[in-house]
Image (cartoon, rainbow, N blue to C red):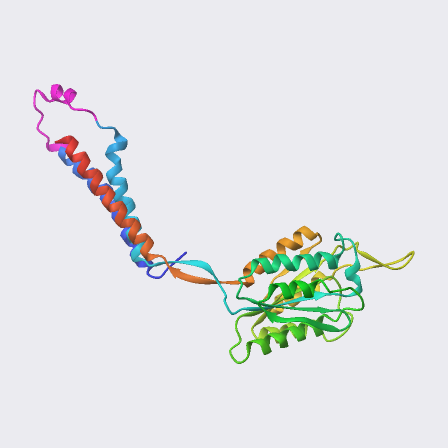
Amino acid sequence: MSLQNPIFLLALLLIPAGILAARLAKARRRKFAVRLPTAGTLATLIPRESPVKRAIPGALLAAAVASLAFALAKPEVTVSVPVERASVMLVTDASGSMRATDVAPSRLDAARSAVGSFLSEVPEAMRVGLISYSSTVETLQAPTTDRAAVRDSASTISANGGTATGDALAEAVQRLKNDGGDDMPPSAILLLSDGMTSAGVDPLGVAQTAKQAGISISTVALGTPDGTVTLQPGITRAVPPDPETLRQIAEISGGRAFTVDDAGELDQVYEKMGSQLGTRPEQREATAGFAGLGALLLGAAVFALMRRRDRLT
């Protein structure tokens, strides 16, 4: 929460000032009080009021002053609001290393199933596209609001070949530019990959291009350092992920980098990213809430004072 006019918080000084004034007034009354011989007898006939009940009106009044002071300071809170025209390209690695089974049932199967988690978290108005890549790049689905089309496209991905991450990112950037036209809406890329780039252009250079276009790239490094794929019976090859390169891609473009080695964690990452990419933070003034609360507390304080006065008279 932030405040537009914090100077009005000085009104909070009225609370200790009021407490001090009340104590001084009480001390003055005791000093100049005239004691009657029958005061003790009369005191036993008057119901004694508990300290808690005596403190209630003052506490309510102090809370009302505090709430009204915050209202005058014009507080603002940050809320997440849907980005209605946002577009996101999902870029999924489909190289041969995605056949590794260190993430059950395989890295590629885990990635395909997680697409559903992502789609379920973004607003219906968000346009989502899908690109898969290995040695070459294939646009499976241009940005669309048709969730079923994206899911169907994801189910067709198969793993084979090298890893042209830079080419895939360049294609995703171009697709988002074409989709947005002259007035490009908020756009982002979510890249899921497990391997080191082995073909195509440098992905770090593409990340810089994406940043200049206002497109962030968030990355997910999938797999474990012990991951392997079987080339032929009895022959395997190590296929560890390359989280450092993916981290640099995200950092350069203004996105976020994640590292996961479990399919369950991958679902959570997609859900979180879907929620973040589908909303944007917005400052909203909360003055009315504090003013209303202050008025309510002030009314309660007046009511408590009147009831206490009635009991004493």
The magenta region covers 30-48
Residue 256 location (% of width, % of height): 61, 62
Rendering quarter of residue 236: bottom right
Rendering quarter of residue 53: top left
The residue at 60%/74% (across/down) is 176
Q: Using the rendered image of the protein, determine whether residue 58 is visible from the camera's viewpoint.
A: yes
**Of the pair 30 and 245, the residue shown nearer to us:** 245
Residue found farthest to the bottom:
182
The residue at 66%/57% (across/down) is 114
Q: Using the rendered image of the protein, determine whether residue 27 is visible from the camera's viewpoint.
A: no
Rendering quarter of residue 309: top left
How many numbered tags mark residues here?
Answer: 0
Relative to 82, residue 203 above or below = below
Q: Is residue 263 left or right of residue 42?
A: right
Residue 155 location (% of width, % of height): 71, 62
Q: Is residue 56 left or right of residue 118?
A: left
Relative to 99, residue 23 above or below = above
- Report if residue 31 lies within the magenta region: yes
